[in-house]
Amino acid sequence: MHRTHGLRYKSRKLLSKKPREKGRPGISRWLYEYNVGDKVVIDIDPTFITTAPHRRYQGKVGTIIGRRGKAYEIEIYVGGKRKVIITTPDHIVPFKAQPTETKASAS
């Protein structure tokens, strides 16, 4: 029998929630205001399937380039190519850069 290779193929672990995460996300995820130029991380919420980006973009960092109604346009570079993802705030979180550690030289 022929195997299917649909949109959510091989994504059981990626697009499922842990027991303590189940249910609706907190309201702060929707109330956060994003501006053009802000960096965001794509974090797919499996509760909202219709507005979810493709699973290949899970965990990627992009830049907000505009709005379309309630959704945001996010610019991502994958393999040297520019991609524009249109998704709602359910699937994005603000990007917090890791602090760089500097070693103080001993005198």
Image (spheres, rainbow, N blue to C red):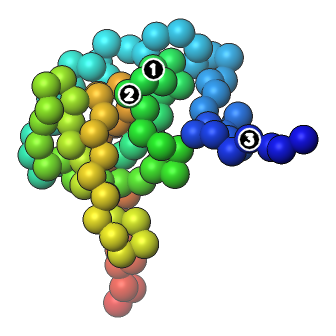
**In the image, residue 47 above or below residue 34:** above
Q: Secondary structure at mark 2?
A: loop
User: Which class describes the residues within 10 Å of circle 2: few (<14), some (14-19), or many (20+)?
Assistant: some
**Residue lying farthest to the top in this orientation:** 23
Q: Which mark is residue 4?
A: 3
For the residues labelled 1 and 2, the Cα–Cα distance comes to: 6 Å
**Residue lying farthest to the front in this orientation:** 1
Q: Which mark is residue 91?
A: none
The residue at which mark 2 appears reads as 51
For the residues labelled 3 and 1, the Cα–Cα distance comes to: 22 Å
Residue 7 percent location from the top left of the image: 58, 39
Residue 64 percent location from the top left of the image: 18, 47
Q: Please indicate, yes or no, whether residue 40 appears anywhere in the rendered image.
A: no
Residue at (45%, 50%) from the top-left corner?
57
The answer to whether mark 1 and mark 2 are in CB contact below 8 A is: yes
Residue type, label 3: Thr
Q: Which mark is residue 48?
A: 1
Q: Is residue 57 left or right of residue 93?
A: right
Residue 6 percent location from the top left of the image: 63, 40
Residue at (22%, 30%) from the top-left corner?
71
Residue type, label 1: Phe
